[in-house]
Image (cartoon, helix red, strand yellow):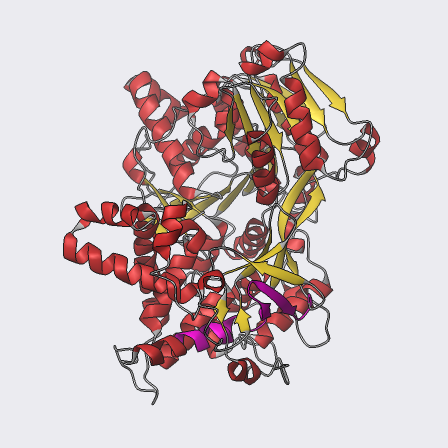
Amino acid sequence: MVSRGVPPAAGALPQTPLLLLRRRICLDCGEGGGSILTEVEQVIRKSSAVSPSHVSIVVASSLSGVYTEVPQYLYQELTDGKILAVVVEDPERSANRLVSAIATESHSVTPDARLERSERSRGVWGAAPAAGGRQPTQLEAGSVGYTSLFSDFVGAQTRVKYVTAEMLLREALVDPLLRSYGIVYVEDFHERAAWTDILLGVTKKVLKVRPDDLRVVVHSVTDDVVELLRRFFSPGEDEKTRPFVVQVKEGEEKSSLVNHVDVLYSTQSYGDYVKAAVDTVTSLYSGESRRLVETATVVVFLASKGDVSRASQLLKYHSGLPQGIGIATEVETLDMKDLSQGGLIVLTCENGAETNFKMLSCGTVQFVVDCGYRGYKWFQGASDGRGNADINDTVNFPVAKSQAELRKLLASHADGPGKCFRLYTEAAAFNVLTDGYIPQIQGSSQLPEIILRLKALGIDNIARSFPFLTAPSVDVISRTLSLLWWHKIIDDYGKLTAMGEKLALLPLDIRLGRAVYLAAQTGCLSEMITIAAMVAVGGLSAVLMKSEQAMADHKQFYTVEGDYLTLLNIYALYISTRKRDGVSFINKWAKNHGIHGDVLEGARNIRSQLQTAVNRTGLRQLDTTGKSTSSAPSNPSELANTISNCITQAFFLQVAKRISHNTYELVGPHSNSSSTALPDTFCVYSDLTKPLTSPWVVYEKLTQGTDGNIYLTGVNMADRATLELTNYYKSIRR
């Protein structure tokens, strides 16, 4: 998710109840027994007495308060000006949640009570900290900051820093031992995100060098990862590396609010689970419990955004739904008030939706429909003997048994008994569902960027030298290395090239990163940074409005060179208008031209961040003679050709040939299939009376529409001679 650059502010999120203090917890010391205590601080303090380990594992549900309480406890243990790194998927949202909790607590707890709690929480989470000055006893909102891909709200006063695993690894390129951090706290490890797995591998190496002043705390909603983490951090019997486990169980007052959930399995397997899900939802509104359903929230778990889009269309035109029933497709944008009112169908494929705080606490989710799948962005390489087409597909995998259980429990927090409809058989629940979440590192679409980062950290022999929690197959690593070689990011010996060293520092995927690198050498760096920023906010589909009038207004922006040059045109006109007429007028201008002004403003902020990142790499714009210059080619036609050539060289593994007005034959691994261009590409609006400059195009990605057709997005004209210069294609059919 691209941050819009909004700093944490008190009250920005719904108030989070601080429940952890009153939870019953089971302390598992790895000795076969457990003890029940009523105060979490007592348990945490006991952990320091029974375990010298600097690695702790916290197993706690989303409603336990773990997201707001644990960072505050860990803050008390920071010494010598160190920072607490809280590793999350969405730093901005998580930072706002903590700030909101701090604001809530400051108004509801007396200063004496806060001081008493702070004194009780000293010396927690493993071995006693090294000598040194402690932090203030109470965490203040001003000490919380966050860093994400394109946002950085961290200042000199920041002591609790929310950050993505990817960004923390990028910091490791400059500070390999993470010296500025005293504690690394990883939330929601059970999701098994690829970058998180890599971060734990790096911290394991760092702990060998910093065994006395670095701690690692890992949180999971499910307990199926505990044994994996124990074996990973302590393969032997060394107590100093053996993780200490704290399991937070629901207290009696909360358990009384959890209702029984009936689980209904399908009697057959569904080939079209999207239609089966829609049929299940509509049947709820026509049954005996219709009045109950109309006041409740129905949550439908699907595998991909395409599934969600298709289900939404089917439900909108279904005659069986009562009037007034709302349909939502994004959990994070849902208003808590709307959720609390009920009468809502929520279609979701988002990671972590089953543990989302708003969904768990709204009190209206009483019905859950579970398709049994989860979609992953998976790296798909073509085994053609020469290299790998850079095509990332969404691949559906059966959910983990623990994830299916979490989806079911989502229906247990309403006023009455809940129901969970599983669109798979009971036998499949035992034999097909996996025992744990799929480790995304085994085939993540981000593998090229991950291996690039590891090589930049000095780990050349990835398969043998790096401690993976769950290692990708040798074949997957080999195909990823082949992809990097074709992009000239690594050389014949697997070492980073000069371009590879620069790309490792950029917050871009390898293709856009390479386009920026090539642009610096050909005099169009500024323009390519703009294009990268516009792609980061979602490209044409996010920038342009979808109404018929708006689509007519868009024609003035289209260029024959393709979508990326069109994005450049839109941004250039937006900025020039903004400077000429002022910020107050720009939103009206954007609306009149069928453009989302807020998206363009986000692109402007991202471009600023990208420019800073590029400057740090030392990249400078060069002219055709190799001398530094601040100007691009003066001839607009020459500039367009230069930009197009950079894009072609960066996306040369994703090529298609136009065989009719809007049909393309894919070159490479999908050469036997055809795809239809999206309606918002330049292809549909180009003047068919004029001859095409080239029938060849490169594209950003393939997507599958709700109609089953394959579509191209991010389509750009490609010159055949430039494609042949890449040496991937010995000769291309004319």
Closer to us: 236 or 479: 479
Question: In the drawing, does residue 4 fall left or right of residue 233?
Answer: left
**On screen, residue 458 above or below 628:** above
Is residue 652 in the magenta section?
yes
Q: Is residue 402 visible?
A: no
**Where are the magenta residues, as a range?**
643-670
Residue 384 in the image, given as x and y percentages of width and height? 72, 73
Q: Is residue 329 visible?
A: yes
Closer to us: 466 or 205: 466
Residue 356 in the image, given as x and y percentages of width and height? 52, 30
Closer to us: 233 or 586: 586
**On screen, residue 76 above or below 242:** above
Residue farthest bottom in this picture: 625
Q: Quadrant of residue 227?
A: top right
Residue at point 34%, 22% (across, down): 105
**On screen, residue 440 above or below 713:** above
Question: In the drawing, does residue 355 fall left or right of residue 108?
Answer: right
